[in-house]
Image (cartoon, grey):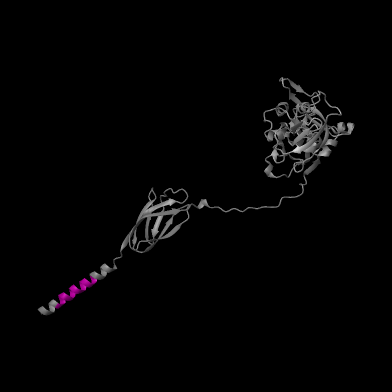
C-alpha cells in the first residue's frame, strides 16, 4: 500500500511539473514600441492619432507621443487620423524594444491635381474687332491725326464731348474703354486735357478696336479694347542719308535763359516711350523732358522713337549724337524744297552751324543711325 501511494505521489508531481513547463513555454514574450507621430510637412506633433498593432491599440497624447506593448515580432503598426492619409509600417521588435520611433503623417490637402488646357492663339481678329491703319487716321477729314476722332466715325462709337477725344462705345462710359500699347496699359491716352491723342499715327503700325468678345486677360473693362502697335523702326539696319537741317523744341541756353519754338508745343511724340525708357521722369512735362535731354531730334517716322543718330556737318567735321524724340518734319515742307529734312534741337543745330542762321541751303548734314547705348552729345 505504501509503495503504491508513493508511486502515485511521484506521478502527480511529474504531471504538475510538465503542465507548469508547458504553461510557461506558451506565455509570449512582449516588447514595447514607443515614439512620436508628427505632421510630414511641418513636423508638428499630432495628438489623437489612433495607433494599433493587431488588437493592441492606443492614442497619441497632446505631444503626439504613444506607448504600446506588443508581442516580440515584426510588428505592423497602423496609424489613422481624420484629414491625413493612413500609414502602415513595420517595426522589428523581435530582439529588443523600440522607444524612439518617429512616424510621419501626410495631410490629405497637401496634394492636388490640375489639368492645363492650352489652345492655339487665333490668327485672325475677332469679328467685333476693327483694324484701323495709320494712313486712314491721317486721311480722316477733321481728325487732325487723332485716332480717337477717326474711331468716332465707326458704328457704335460716339464722342462724349464736342471738342474732346473721349469716346463712348455702345453706350458705355469712357472709363470702360481700355487702351493697350505694345502690351502695356495706357491709363491716359489723351493730351491737352483730351483735345488730342497721345499717339502719333506716323509711329504706329496699326490700331485695332474691339467692341466685345475680347480676352479676360485685358481686365474688367466692359465697353471696348483699343490695341496700339508701334512700328518696329530700323534698329536692325542703320539708316544713313543726307538731310537739310532746321531746329525746333524747347531748350535752355548757357546763360540759363529758357527758349521755345513758337511753332512747336514742346510735347514730344515719343514722350511716353522716353518715360518708359527712363530718359525722362514720369513727373516731368514735355518741355522739361526736352530741356533736360538737350540733344534730340525728330523724324521718328524714318528712324523710330528713341533711335540715336550721329549727325555730322561734312564741311567742318563737327558731329553730335542725338535721340529721336518727336515726329516731323511735315511732308509738305520736304515737298516744297524737294529735299529730305531733319528737325533737331537748337543746341544740336548751333553746335553744327555756328553762323547763327536757322535754315538755309547750306545747312547740309550727313546722318547715320548708331547703337542705342551711344552717349548723347558732342562727338569728340
- Tell me what residue is drawn at x 80 percent, y 37 percent: 301
Residue 290 shown left or right of residue 65 in the figure: right
Q: Is residue 11 magenta?
A: yes
| Residue in front for this viewpoint, 166 or 235 | 235
Q: Quadrant of the C terminus?
A: top right
Residue 283 placement (x, y as % from top left): 67, 28
Q: Is residue 143 above or below residue 45?
A: above
Total marks in image: 0
Q: Residue furthest left?
A: 2
Q: Is residue 246 magenta?
A: no
Magenta residues, as a range?
A: 7-19
| Residue in front for this viewpoint, 203 or 23 | 203
| Residue in front for this viewpoint, 301 or 317 | 317
- Tell me what residue is drawn at x 81 percent, y 36 percent: 150
Q: Quadrant of residue 69?
A: bottom left
Q: Is residue 75 above or below residue 1?
A: above
Q: Quadrant of residue 273?
A: top right
Residue 11 visible to the viewer: yes
Q: Quadrant of residue 143?
A: top right
- Tell me what residue is drawn at x 40 percent, y 56 percent: 51
Residue 305 placement (x, y as % from top left): 75, 36
Amino acid at each position: 500500500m505504501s509503495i503504491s501511494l508513493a508511486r502515485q505521489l511521484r506521478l502527480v508531481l511529474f504531471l504538475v511539473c510538465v503542465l507548469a513547463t508547458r504553461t510557461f513555454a506558451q506565455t509570449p514574450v512582449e516588447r514595447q514600441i514607443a515614439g512620436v507621430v508628427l505632421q510630414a510637412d511641418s513636423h508638428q506633433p499630432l495628438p489623437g492619432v489612433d495607433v494599433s498593432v493587431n488588437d493592441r491599440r492606443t492614442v497619441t497624447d497632446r505631444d503626439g507621443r504613444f506607448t504600446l506593448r506588443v508581442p516580440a515580432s515584426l510588428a505592423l503598426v497602423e496609424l489613422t487620423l481624420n484629414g491625413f492619409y493612413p500609414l502602415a509600417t513595420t517595426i522589428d521588435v523581435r530582439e529588443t524594444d523600440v522607444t524612439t520611433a518617429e512616424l510621419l503623417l501626410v495631410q490629405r490637402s497637401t496634394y492636388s491635381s490640375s489639368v492645363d488646357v492650352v489652345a492655339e492663339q487665333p490668327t485672325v481678329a475677332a469679328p467685333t474687332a476693327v483694324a484701323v491703319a495709320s494712313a486712314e487716321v491721317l486721311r480722316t477729314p477733321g481728325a487732325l491725326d487723332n485716332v480717337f476722332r477717326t474711331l468716332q466715325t465707326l458704328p457704335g462709337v460716339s464722342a462724349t464731348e464736342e471738342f474732346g477725344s473721349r469716346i463712348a462705345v455702345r453706350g458705355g462710359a469712357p472709363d470702360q474703354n481700355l487702351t493697350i500699347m505694345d502690351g502695356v496699359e495706357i491709363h491716359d491716352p489723351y493730351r491737352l486735357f483730351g483735345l488730342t491723342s497721345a499717339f502719333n499715327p506716323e509711329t504706329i503700325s496699326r490700331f485695332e478696336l474691339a467692341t466685345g468678345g475680347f480676352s479676360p486677360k485685358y481686365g474688367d473693362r466692359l465697353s471696348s479694347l483699343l490695341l496700339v502697335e508701334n512700328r518696329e523702326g530700323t534698329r536692325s539696319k542703320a539708316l544713313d542719308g543726307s538731310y537739310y537741317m532746321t531746329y525746333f523744341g524747347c531748350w535752355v541756353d548757357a546763360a540759363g535763359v529758357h527758349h521755345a519754338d513758337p511753332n512747336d508745343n514742346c510735347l514730344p511724340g515719343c514722350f511716353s516711350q522716353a518715360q518708359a525708357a527712363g530718359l525722362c521722369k514720369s513727373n516731368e512735362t514735355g518741355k522739361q523732358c526736352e530741356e533736360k535731354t538737350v540733344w534730340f531730334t525728330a523724324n521718328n517716322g524714318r528712324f523710330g522713337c528713341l533711335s540715336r543718330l550721329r549727325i555730322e556737318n561734312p564741311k567742318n567735321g563737327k558731329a553730335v549724337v542725338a535721340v529721336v524724340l518727336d515726329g516731323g518734319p511735315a511732308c509738305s515742307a520736304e515737298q516744297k524744297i524737294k529735299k529730305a529734312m531733319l528737325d533737331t534741337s537748337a543746341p544740336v543745330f548751333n553746335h553744327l552751324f555756328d553762323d547763327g542762321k536757322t535754315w538755309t541751303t547750306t545747312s547740309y548734314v550727313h546722318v547715320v543711325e548708331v547703337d542705342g547705348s551711344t552717349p548723347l552729345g558732342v562727338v569728340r
